[in-house]
Image (cartoon, rainbow, N blue to C red):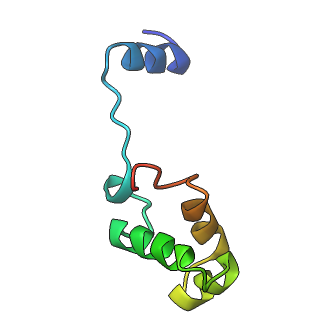
Amino acid sequence: MGTKADNNADKMRKGRHKALKGEGHPCVKITEEKVIEIRDLYKSGGFSHVSLAKHLGLTKGLVSSVLLRQSWKHIT
């Protein structure tokens, strides 16, 4: 028995923590395919973050976090 912080540290130390990434995360809003599409369209040079978000029906924040690799870092 310990504090929540103690228990979390113990879990990490013993390798019992499973980080959910990408489509495995319960709060995911887009697919890996969509991430690749966002990055490819942006690389083509025809879109800004805002115009790309409008084009795909997504929020600017989501598109920006994908393009800046703040999210979906594991997708190249």
Vertical position of residue 52 compared to residue 12: above or below = below
Q: Is residue 57 left or right of residue 1?
A: right
Residue in the image at 31% along x and 54% along y: 24
Farthest-out residue, front? 44
76 vs 19: above or below: below
Q: Nearer the viewer, residue 14 or 60?
A: 60
Q: Dividing the picture into quarters, in which one does residue 76 lie?
A: bottom left
Q: Work out which quarter of the rendered image holds the N terminus and state it.
A: top left
Q: Position of residue 34 (x, y in %)?
A: 40, 74
Numbered disc total: 0
- Give the residue displayed 54% in from the left and 18% down from the top: 5
Q: Is residue 2 left or right of residue 63?
A: left
Image x and y of residue 56, in percent: 51, 86
Q: Give the residue displayed 38% in from the left and 49% down from the top.
A: 21
Task: In the rendered view, tell whether residue 17 sits above or below residue 76.
Answer: above
Left or right: 26 with respect to 68? left
Q: Let me know if residue 31 appears in the view.
A: yes
Query: Which residue reaches farthest bottom?
Result: 55
Determine the residue positioned at 63% across, 66% down. Answer: 64
Q: Position of residue 67 (x, y in %)?
A: 57, 63
Q: Who is closer to the viewer here, 41 or 35?
A: 41
Q: Is residue 30 visible?
A: no
The quarter holding residue 58 reads: bottom right
- Residue 20 at x, y = what percent? 36, 45
**12 shown above or below 59:** above
